Structures are given as C-alpha cells and as structure tokens.
Image (cartoon, grey):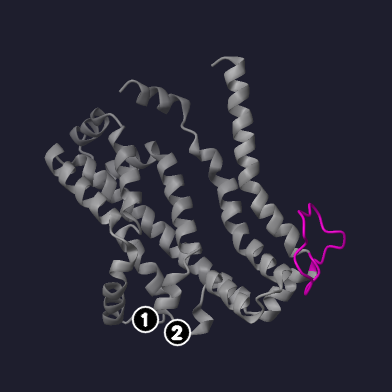
C-alpha cells in the first residue's frame, strides 16, 4: 500500500472514529450541566461549572444500582451460553456434507429474516409453561438458541475457512468431535468469538422489550427500563437523563476497548487462510 493510500485510509478512519465518539462525548458533557436548566442553544465542549453530583442523583431517584446488577447477571449468563451454543452449532454445520450444510444454511437465513415480534406470543407462552415469567431467566432463555441466527452464521463462516485437513487429521488420531471443537476449532476462530461476545453483550445489555414483556416486579428490571423510568419521572431534566445514559453506555465502551485488539487475526493464521 502506497503512502498516500495509507494516509487516506488513516484520515478516513479518524473521521469515522470522531463521528462515532462525539455523540457519547456530548452526552457526557450534557450530563454535567445544571439540573433544571434548558439544553444549551449551541454545542458545549465542556461545561463551565460541571455538576458531578448528577451521577449520584441518578441512583437516588431510581434504584439504578439494582437495575445495573440485574443487567450484569443477565449478560453474565447469556454471553457464555450464546458462545457455547453458537460455536457448537457453527462447528457442527461445517462437519456435515455439502447438501445438508446448504439446507441448514438456508433454514438459518430464513430464521434470521423472521421479525422478532412474530415470536413474542409463542415465547411468552413457553416461558409461562416453564414458570420463568417474572424472573431473570426469562431474559436469558434465548441464549439456549444462540440468541441470534447471525451468531451461528459468523461461527459457520469462520470454521469453514479452516482447512478441512486439520479436522481430518485430528479425527484419524482419535480425537472426538468435542475435543476437536475445543482444542482445534475454537482457538482458530478467536476473532469470531470476540465479535460474538461484544454483539451478545450489547444485545442483552440494551434489551428494553423483553423486561417489559416478561417481568412485572420492578426490582428485577434492567438498566434500559431504569432509564425509561427516569425519563417518565422527569422528562425535561436533561443533565440527569444524560448522566444515566452515560452510566449505561460505559460498560459497552469498556468491553469494546478491552477486546478490540483481538479482532485482528494472528499473522500466521492470516497467511494460512490466504492460501485457500
């Protein structure tokens, strides 16, 4: 890559990064404003008199600490379950003959395009039959089906890029399917695992509809419902609302910063894939 193209690439990346970071930064700045005051007429890069106590006020108005804890419990259960089910499903699809792979791939894509609203009633009846209504288990149960068909497809495409000879040699050496998946498959699709981890965390952390549908006890609500409760209590107090938004967004941002370096493929593995 020439120096000009490399410079242009970095400039575009910087512009895109700034465009994505600015809304969160403005929310943080707005969270430090004076409570009860109207929004500023122009962009404020830093408040002249930052009100840090706004963050404590959020926890005084609504039990945001309990809501955050509930959200953490949900993602702590849902993320590992999703990784397990999605990776096993994707690995199993790769091991099937091409004809069966095609049929399962078609079924997965069809399931992907079905709107989530179409299964709300069926899921409610299923959860009621299982006795999970009004429990955090109602929010975790989709993880037993990989949470989203896209996660299965991500693993399927990743496992498919691994040379089939690696799996065949392991089978000849007496390795079981479970051992091959755990010792050979998973280490080679680490970027897919990291991507599914982040996407699953965001999916469950920001889920607003499921708690409303399946929970009745306010003590079991999650952070997004807590934000909506805060909005209904004081719709015009923008600093307090933006403080709550910042609190809820920070775990997602921290997780991405923690894991983003793993998105890059190992150089040796990249050369191995390039041979196919």
Compare marks 1 and 2 and give the one earlier in the sequence.
1
Looking at the rendered structure, the secondary structure element under dot 2 is: loop
Is 40 one of the magenta-colored residues?
Answer: yes
Q: Quadrant of residue 215?
A: bottom left
Q: Residue at x 63, y 37 (%)?
A: 15
Q: Quadrant of residue 249?
A: bottom right
Q: Residue at x 65, y 53 (%)?
A: 23
Q: Is residue 169 visible?
A: yes
Is 147 one of the magenta-colored residues?
Answer: no
Q: Main secondary structure of the magenta part?
A: loop
Q: Are marks 1 and 2 in contact (CB under 8 Å)?
A: yes
Q: Nearer the viewer, residue 64 or 213?
A: 213
Which residue is label 2 attached to?
216
**Label 1, label 2: how many angstroms apart (C-alpha)?**
8 Å
The magenta stretch is 33-52
Residue 264 image offset from top left, x and y in percent: 50, 34
Q: Please rate how many residues cluster around mark 2, counting C-alpha atoms within 10 Å: few if below 14, some from 14 to 19, many from 20.
A: few
Q: In the rendered view, does 275 fall on the left or right side of 270? A: left
Q: Residue at x 26, y 81 (%)?
A: 129
Residue that protrudes farthest toward the top in the picture: 2
Which residue is label 1 attached to?
133
Q: In the rendered view, does 162 fall on the left or right side of 46? A: left
């Amino acid at each position: 890559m020439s120096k000009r193209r490399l410079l242009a690439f970095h400039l575009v990346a910087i512009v895109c990064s700034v465009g994505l970071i600015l809304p969160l930064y403005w929310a943080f700045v707005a969270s430090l404003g004076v409570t009860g005051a109207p929004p500023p007429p122009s962009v404020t890069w830093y408040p002249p008199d930052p009100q840090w106590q706004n963050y404590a006020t959020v926890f005084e108005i609504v039990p945001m600490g309990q809501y955050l804890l509930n959200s953490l419990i949900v993602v702590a259960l849902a993320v590992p379950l999703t990784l397990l089910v999605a990776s096993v499903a994707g690995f199993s699809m790769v091991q099937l003959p091409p004809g069966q792979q095609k049929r399962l791939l078609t079924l997965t894509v069809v399931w992907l395009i079905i709107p989530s609203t179409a299964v709300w009633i069926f899921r409610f009846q299923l959860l009621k039959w299982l006795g999970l209504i009004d429990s955090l288990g109602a929010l975790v149960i989709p993880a037993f089906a990989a949470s989203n068909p896209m996660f299965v497809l991500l693993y399927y495409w990743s496992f498919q890029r691994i040379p089939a000879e690696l799996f065949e040699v392991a089978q000849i050496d007496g390795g079981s399917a479970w051992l091959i998946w755990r010792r050979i498959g998973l280490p080679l699709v680490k970027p897919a695992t990291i991507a599914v981890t982040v996407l699953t965390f965001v999916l469950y952390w920001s889920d607003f509809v499921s708690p409303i549908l399946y929970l009745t006890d306010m003590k079991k609500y999650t952070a997004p419902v807590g934000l909506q409760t805060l909005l209904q209590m004081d719709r015009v107090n923008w600093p307090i609302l933006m403080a709550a938004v910042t609190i809820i967004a920070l775990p997602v941002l921290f997780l991405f910063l923690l894991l983003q370096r793993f998105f890059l493929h190992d150089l040796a593995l990249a050369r191995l894939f390039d041979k196919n």
